[in-house]
């Protein structure tokens, strides 16, 4: 029996005690998947697992607080669940976590850059090393290493860090993350960096998909982007307003962002938003030796107070 079939069997066993289980199902074409809210055994039969299952389903959990919910997670998604538990945004007793070791997911944007239009995807077949896709009558073979999401290249958590039902054999963790992408960007002058971000933000349409897809953005009803009391940001279509929102968004995630990449994936115009979040995570890691969503018992550093921080020489100026 495959790992997926074993997982479906386990979900069906536990489904009577749960209000729902969240997983993935086939989307509007063979390349895309959608979140699947399973309430019956027939729903469970629709579930998928594999490199096409890109969504971080932990985003839905805060809105379902108080219900008995099962959720299928990848290793990186489990970090978001840990962070939500740390902040008491969900209750551990109410959440049943199902998982299979993850070998990575695809980037739709990378596939589009290679193939061109993805308006008419006719067939997709995934193998251990390659993905075969037929688009508008043209067949393509794409190596998974060339189309994997950037986060997968540096992933240190193929196995979920917290789970109730673990199916399959754990994958040995070997990747390292030296934040080389952030260091490379930091090497530019301040003028170059500002020019880069202003050019990127000029394309922003203020749809707030980055905020809505983020599992840690939980104050959407009171978001500064739309608040009128106090009135932080205008609705003017200016680069300054867009940049202001993204900086607030990034700062609100400092020490909390698990780098799931949903903000960047959801952006309809392809702004590299994860670079902002990774810059802050690099500083948090340097100052506090902390990576979000890796230890349930830990307290995020910006939600705690110490008179003397170990790595900040506050009195030595």
Image: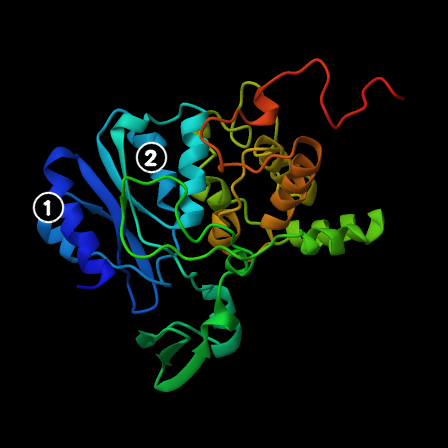
Q: Is residue 134 above or below residue 94?
A: below
Q: Which residue is mark 2?
A: 61
Whether residue 231 is visible to the viewer of this picture, yes or no, is no
In this orientation, does residue 91 appear?
yes
Q: How far across and how far down the image is residue 11, in percent?
A: 17, 46
Residue that extends furthest to the right in the rendered view of this protein: 317
Q: Quadrant of the N terminus?
A: bottom left
Q: Quadrant of residue 63?
A: top left
Q: Residues within 10 Å of mark 2 (few under 14, many from 20)?
A: many
Mark number, residue 40: 1
Residue at x-position 12% and y-position 47%: 12
Q: Specify whether 290 is left or right of 61.
A: right
Residue 151 place in picture, x, y as percent: 53, 55
Disc 2 element: loop
Q: Nearer the viewer, residue 238 or 26?
A: 26
Apparent side of residue 54 relative to residue 23 in the rendered image (left or right):
right
Q: CA distance from mark 2 to mark 1?
A: 19 Å
């Amino acid at each position: 029996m495959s790992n997926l079939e074993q997982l479906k069997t386990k979900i069906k066993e536990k489904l009577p005690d749960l209000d729902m289980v969240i997983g993935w199902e086939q989307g509007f074409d063979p390349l895309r998947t959608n979140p699947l809210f399973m309430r019956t055994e027939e729903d469970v039969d629709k579930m998928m697992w594999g490199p096409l299952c890109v969504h971080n389903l932990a985003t839905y959990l805060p809105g379902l607080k108080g219900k008995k919910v099962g959720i299928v997670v990848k290793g990186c998604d489990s970090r978001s669940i840990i962070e939500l538990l740390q902040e008491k945004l969900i209750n551990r007793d109410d959440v049943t976590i199902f998982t299979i070791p993850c070998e990575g997911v695809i980037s739709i944007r990378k596939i589009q850059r290679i193939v061109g239009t993805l308006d008419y995807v006719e067939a997709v077949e995934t193998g251990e090393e390659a993905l075969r896709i037929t688009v508008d009558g043209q067949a393509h073979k794409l190596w998974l290493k060339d189309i994997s999401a950037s986060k997968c290249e540096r992933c240190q958590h193929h196995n979920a860090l917290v789970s109730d039902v673990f199916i399959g054999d754990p994958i040995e963790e070997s990747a390292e993350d030296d934040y080389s992408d952030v260091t490379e960007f930091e090497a530019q002058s301040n003028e170059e960096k500002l020019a880069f971000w202003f050019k990127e933000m000029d394309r922003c349409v203020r749809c707030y998909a980055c905020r809505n897809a983020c599992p840690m953005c939980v104050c959407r009803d009171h978001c500064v982007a739309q608040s009128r009391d106090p009135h932080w940001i205008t609705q003017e279509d200016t680069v300054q307003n867009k940049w202001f929102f993204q900086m607030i968004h990034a700062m609100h995630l400092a020490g909390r962002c698990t780098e799931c990449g949903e903000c960047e994936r959801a952006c309809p115009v392809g702004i590299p938003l994860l670079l902002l979040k990774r810059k802050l995570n690099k500083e948090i890691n340097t100052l506090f030796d902390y990576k979000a969503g890796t230890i349930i018992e830990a307290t995020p550093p910006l939600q705690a107070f110490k008179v003397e921080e170990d790595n900040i020489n506050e009195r030595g100026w």
